Image: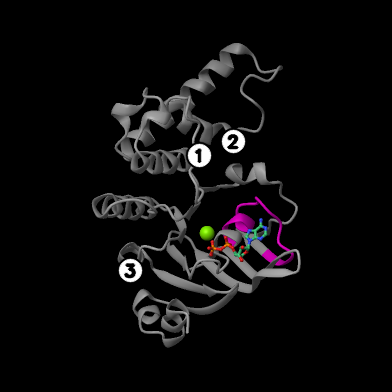
Amino acid sequence: MTALLEVQALSRDFGGVRAVNRVDFQVKQGEILALIGPNGAGKSTVLNMVSGVIPPSEGEIRYNNQGLAQVPGYEYAGLGITRTFQNLQTFDDMTVLENVMVGMHTKTKSSLFSCGMNLGRARKEEQKIREQAQMWLEHVGLASLAFAQAGSLPYGKLRLMEIARAMVAEPTLLLLDEPAAGLNHTETAEMSKMFQDIRANGTAILLVEHDMDMIMAIADRIVVLDQGTKIAEGTPREIQENPKVIAAYLGT
Ligand code: ADP
Ligand code: MG
């Protein structure tokens, strides 16, 4: 299968410290690739580079065979790359629906209310975004909370809201940074099911996650980082039995 995302010799330095060191991997169309590793391994830094939040120090990121080095971060959603963050990025004073609609506004090039766009067209566009957001709220089981203030929702539901926000722009590649952090077993299982549905609809997922039950249940392949370097790559089964991986997690 062709690579949707290809990362080559990707590195990132912070001051004199190398957080990510010459990492290579590919995400193929419609697969779930898990990126795992102990705390500080460089997982979030990789996601931040792949989503255009920070530039690489060295190396290359190619998406649909196109280098992303010259593409500004705000254009990534339009290209089909969206993400969630390790820490919630919630607008507490806005409704759940509005929080999800934000995901689509990042995709449209100009602001909806920019001068030059006539009001009728802007209203139509707004309506389309609203419908799309409502559809995704239904998918993640939050339709009944659409008009609740986001700040009033429990943590687990906010995590789902953020996934709806990332999906509303209909990405080809969804980047998730510890989506199950802080969720209970039932919520994690429901989320796993949702990611499988998303994959079945053709969206590839690059998943950073600590929950091994989730990883083993849904990852097609796994890449393991330790101290910035890739130490293993393989199927969940191969990774589970890999002595280097076991050693990295035990800190030996
Ligand atoms: P992970 O997500 O795997 O836990 P991170 O990518 O967050 O790891 O961090 C990798 C390393 O890079 C850590 O040593 C961390 O302290 C460092 N790091 C991450 N972001 C920054 C930053 N903005 N400035 C300085 N150091 C950073
Ligand atoms: Mg992290």
Marking on residue 106: 2
Please tell me whether mark 1 or mark 3 is closer to you in this view. Answer: 3
Q: Please give the residue where the numbered disc 1 appears in the rendered image.
A: 169
Q: Residue at x 56, y 71 (%)?
A: 25
Amino acid under label 1? Ala
Q: Are marks 1 and 2 in contact (CB under 8 Å)?
A: yes
Of callouts 1 and 2, the N-terminal one: 2
Q: Is residue 148 above or below residue 221?
A: above
Marking on residue 112: none
Q: Please give the residue where the numbered disc 3 appears in the rendered image.
A: 216
- Per the rendered image, the range of residues in magenta is 46-60
Name the spot of residue 2 as percent of width and height, x first.
52, 66
Cα distance between the residues tagged 3 and 2: 33 Å
Name the spot of residue 199 as percent of width and height, x first.
38, 55
Q: Give the side of residue 9 with respect to residue 185, left or right.
A: right
The answer, for residue 65, to whether it is visible in the render is: no
Nearer-the-camera pick, 24 or 90:
90
Cα distance between the residues tagged 1 and 3: 28 Å
